[in-house]
């Protein structure tokens, strides 16, 4: 969202350095990351994925994840702490910090581990 497109676009950078500045062909815009920015899930859908509060006792967490034990978030690589909000992805039962997976899913339509 806060990227400077001129620093990332080698064609534009090259044309500016040569003293010519042309807008890219419309066909090239189809491949631009700016035009294809939203590749993830809708916010409404993300907010409907199950969330729960982490509790240190393993019995509570295993009940929510189908007997799978877990300790940390694979997005930020930090361990889960008591009372943090987590999100459980329904198809694969992978668990992540709520904030971490929400940002991931806004940009990617798949589990970071699958």
Image: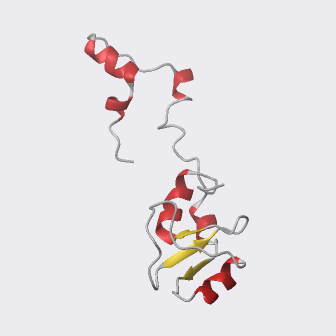
The location of residue 8, given as percent across then percent down, is: 37, 31
The location of residue 107, given as percent across then percent down, is: 53, 51
The location of residue 46, given as percent across then percent down, is: 60, 66
| 51 to 27, vertically: above or below | below
- In this orientation, which residue lies closer to the viewer: 37 or 73? 73
Q: How is the image coloured?
A: secondary structure
- In this orientation, which residue lies closer to the viewer: 54 or 68? 68
Name the quadrant of the C terminus.
bottom right
Residue at 58 percent of width and 55 percent of height:
112
Q: Quadrant of residue 41?
A: bottom right
| 23 to 31, vertically: above or below | above
Residue at 39 percent of width and 27 percent of height:
9
| 74 to 62, vertically: above or below | above
Residue at 61 percent of width and 83 percent of height:
61
The location of residue 83, given as percent across then percent down, is: 46, 85
- In this orientation, which residue lies closer to the viewer: 30 or 80? 80
Q: Is residue 86 left or right of residue 48?
A: left
| 76 to 35, vertically: above or below | below
- In this orientation, which residue lies closer to the viewer: 47 or 104? 104
Counting labels gives 0
Residue at 54 percent of width and 39 percent of height:
36
């Amino acid at each position: 969202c806060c990227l400077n497109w001129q620093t990332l676009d080698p064609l534009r950078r090259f044309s500016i350095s040569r003293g010519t500045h042309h807008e890219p062909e419309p066909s090239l815009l189809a491949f631009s990351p700016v035009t294809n920015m939203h590749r993830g899930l809708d916010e409404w859908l993300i907010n409907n994925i199950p969330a729960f509060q982490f509790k240190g006792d393993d019995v509570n967490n295993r009940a929510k994840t189908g007997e799978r034990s877990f300790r940390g978030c694979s997005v930020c690589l930090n361990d889960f702490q008591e009372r943090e909000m987590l999100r459980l992805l329904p198809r694969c039962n992978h668990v992540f910090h709520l904030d971490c997976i929400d940002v991931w899913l806004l940009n990617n339509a798949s589990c970071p581990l699958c």
